[in-house]
């Protein structure tokens, strides 16, 4: 593996930007992760407010099944990564010292998996899921592979934002195949949300819409995409009280000026 | 997954907010409760500031805490000023810490407009001075917004680490010509020391961990800003007043602003927002 971090960054971006938002983008991100980090499978799990949870993207059926074991058994590295908001690195599931997840470990070993690496996925200030990497051989992730996996988990937050918003009718990408994906540069897209005004507006939405931080940001972003603005522009409109997003049940956060 | 802090029960927090909000217009306790923030007329001795910097390094590689203390120290170097520290990360500029709401508000204006002295100092690696905002013509309408926010003079000093410029230390004042040559010399000397201290600190953390630390610093900012937004809605106030509320509670309860902010969010959403832990590979 001699892929530079910059090359990883570009390839991960291309995977997410080239796919339809949501699950397809998560699947592509998993496939890219398999190619870049020397692992045999990848999956994106979502653990959001305890209500919507499960495996959303994966590189293969096996990876999906492995990831789902954690929800079946109620234990596993992904759930621990979310609970502790820290990466969980298992270089060998078959080690006699590995006793954390008896049911999951047995099932994973039956599938031929030895190494599992789970990276938490953060949206604003909350952990909403994990990127799980599975490998058939034991051993740790190498330095740059670990850094790359952290980048992939960061990008995965974009795909989970789409899922939190749901199949939003306000999002033209779901109805118009020619609509811009909104993620030509996924990194720029993330940077646009990593701003003071966006966080303050998110706080206003937490109060106005009675939702959590992740959903508030998802609403803000959905409105930005639907109205072809940046997250920053929408945030400023909310802060200046020119825009009020309505409390509704379809997750679109439709606004009126 | 959620481990609520027993001291942070929603009811305790709610009562804290009621007390503060009783008059509708909270006033910040002007009495210095912290040796790092001396009275308004009394500049902090540089030797004392350097000693404090060393203590901060010895406290361990907590980059966020270090930067926050750095901003507080710097605002005490020139009395009556407000300090914000800007850092570049992944090409994106973000203010990681502010000494108070005034500095925070100025940074906001700058990022929304996309230009201003702090961004210029950070990008060009040179000192930027604005003696009087009333006559300032660089950066378009930035000066007008600064005046509207009661900022009249600014000094932005690049924070140079290992020959690169990852950011700037910015001092804001509410009067024109607030910074004498002597003040600027002191601020520059302090910034140079601070850059050295920061460099030493950063050598203790790997690149991955550094990115994590900066991310944590930004996540902390996210928590504070979200709390400001909540207060802006529930109390129908602006960001400035909202920050003063958080700051007042922080001072009277001797806890971090970010902790108060996290409790406020938890009391509303039932979930504690917490920054991600540092990235460390374990077996």
Image (cartoon, coloured by chain):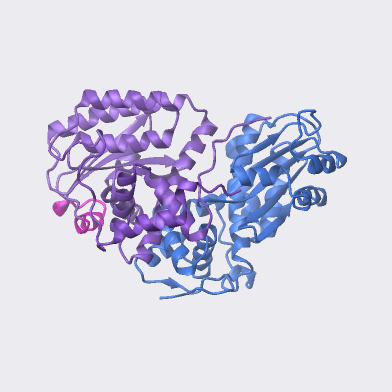
Chain colours: A blue, B purple
Residue at 41% across / 37% down in the picture? B64
Position of residue B217 in the picture relative to residue B151 (left or right): right
B192 left or right of B92 in image: left
Residue closest to the eye, B195 or B261:
B261
Q: Position of residue B118 (x, y in %)?
A: 30, 44
Q: Say whether residue B163 is left or right of residue A36.
A: left
Residue A141: quadrant of the picture? top right
The percent position of residue A166, horizontal first and vertical second, equals 62, 66
The answer to whether one can see residue A231 in this image is yes
| Magenta stretch holds residue B148 | yes
> Residue visible at 48% across and 37% down?
B213
Q: Nearer the viewer, residue A46 or B214?
A: A46
> Which residue appears farthest toward the bottom when viewing the image?
A256
- Total labels: the figure holds 0
Q: Is residue A57 positioned above or below A102 on the image?
A: below
**Image location (x, y in percent) of residue B1:** 61, 48
Q: Is residue B125 visible?
A: no
Residue nearest the observer in this picture, A141 or B113? A141
Query: In the image, residue A216 lies at what x, y percent?
Result: 50, 62
Quadrant occupied by the C terminus of chain B: top right
Magenta run includes residue A91: no
Q: Where are the magenta residues, as a range?
A: B134-149
């Amino acid at each position: 593996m001699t892929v530079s971090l910059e090359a990883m960054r570009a390839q991960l971006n291309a995977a997410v930007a080239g796919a339809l938002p949501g699950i397809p983008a998560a699947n592509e991100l998993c496939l890219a992760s398999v190619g870049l980090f020397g692992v045999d499978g990848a999956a994106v799990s979502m653990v959001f407010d305890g209500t919507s949870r499960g495996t959303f993207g994966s590189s293969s059926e096996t990876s999906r099944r492995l990831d789902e074991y954690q929800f079946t058994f109620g234990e596993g590295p992904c759930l621990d990564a979310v609970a502790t908001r820290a990466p969980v690195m298992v270089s060998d599931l078959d080690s006699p010292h590995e006793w954390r997840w008896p049911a999951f470990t047995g099932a994973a070993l039956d599938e031929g998996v030895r190494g599992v690496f789970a990276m938490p996925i953060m949206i604003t200030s909350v952990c909403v899921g994990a990127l799980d990497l599975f490998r058939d051989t034991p051993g740790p992730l190498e330095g740059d592979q670990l850094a790359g996996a952290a980048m992939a988990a960061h990008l995965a937050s974009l795909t989970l934002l789409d899922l939190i918003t749901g199949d939003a009718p306000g999002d033209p990408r779901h109805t118009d195949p020619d609509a811009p994906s909104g993620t030509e540069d996924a990194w720029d897209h993330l940077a646009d949300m990593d701003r003071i005004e966006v966080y303050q507006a998110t706080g206003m939405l937490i109060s106005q819409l009675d939702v959590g931080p992740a959903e508030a940001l998802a609403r803000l972003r959905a409105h930005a995409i639907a109205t072809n603005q940046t997250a920053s522009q929408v945030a400023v409109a909310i802060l200046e009280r020119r825009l009020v997003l309505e409390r509704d049940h379809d997750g679109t956060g439709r606004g009126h000026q | 997954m959620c481990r609520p802090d027993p001291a942070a029960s929603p009811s305790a927090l709610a009562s804290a907010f009621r007390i503060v909000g009783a008059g509708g217009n909270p006033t910040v306790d002007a009495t210095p409760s912290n040796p790092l923030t001396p009275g308004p007329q009394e500049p902090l001795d540089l030797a004392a500031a350097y000693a404090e910097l060393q203590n901060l390094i010895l406290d361990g590689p907590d980059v966020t805490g270090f930067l926050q203390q750095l901003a507080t120290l710097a605002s005490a170097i020139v009395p009556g000023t407000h300090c914000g520290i800007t850092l570049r990360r992944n090409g994106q500029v973000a203010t990681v810490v502010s000494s108070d709401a005034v500095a925070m508000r100025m940074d906001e204006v700058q990022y929304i407009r996309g230009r201003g002295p702090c961004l210029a100092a950070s990008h060009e690696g040179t000192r930027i001075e604005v003696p009087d905002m009333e006559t300032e013509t660089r950066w378009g309408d930035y000066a007008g917004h600064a005046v509207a926010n009661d900022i009249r003079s600014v000094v932005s000093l690049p924070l140079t680490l290992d020959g690169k410029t990852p950011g700037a230390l910015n001092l804001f004042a509410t009067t024109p010509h607030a910074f004498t040559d002597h003040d600027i010399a002191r601020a520059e000397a302090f910034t140079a020391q601070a850059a050295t201290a920061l460099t030493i600190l950063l050598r203790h953390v790997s690149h991955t961990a550094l990115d994590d630390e900066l991310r944590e610093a930004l996540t902390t900012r996210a928590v504070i800003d979200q709390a400001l937004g909540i207060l802006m809605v529930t109390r129908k106030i602006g960001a400035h007043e909202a920050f003063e509320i958080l700051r007042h509670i922080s001072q009277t309860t001797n806890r971090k602003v970010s902790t108060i902010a996290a409790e406020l969010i938890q009391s509303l959403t039932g979930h504690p927002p917490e920054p991600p832990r540092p990235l460390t590979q374990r077996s």
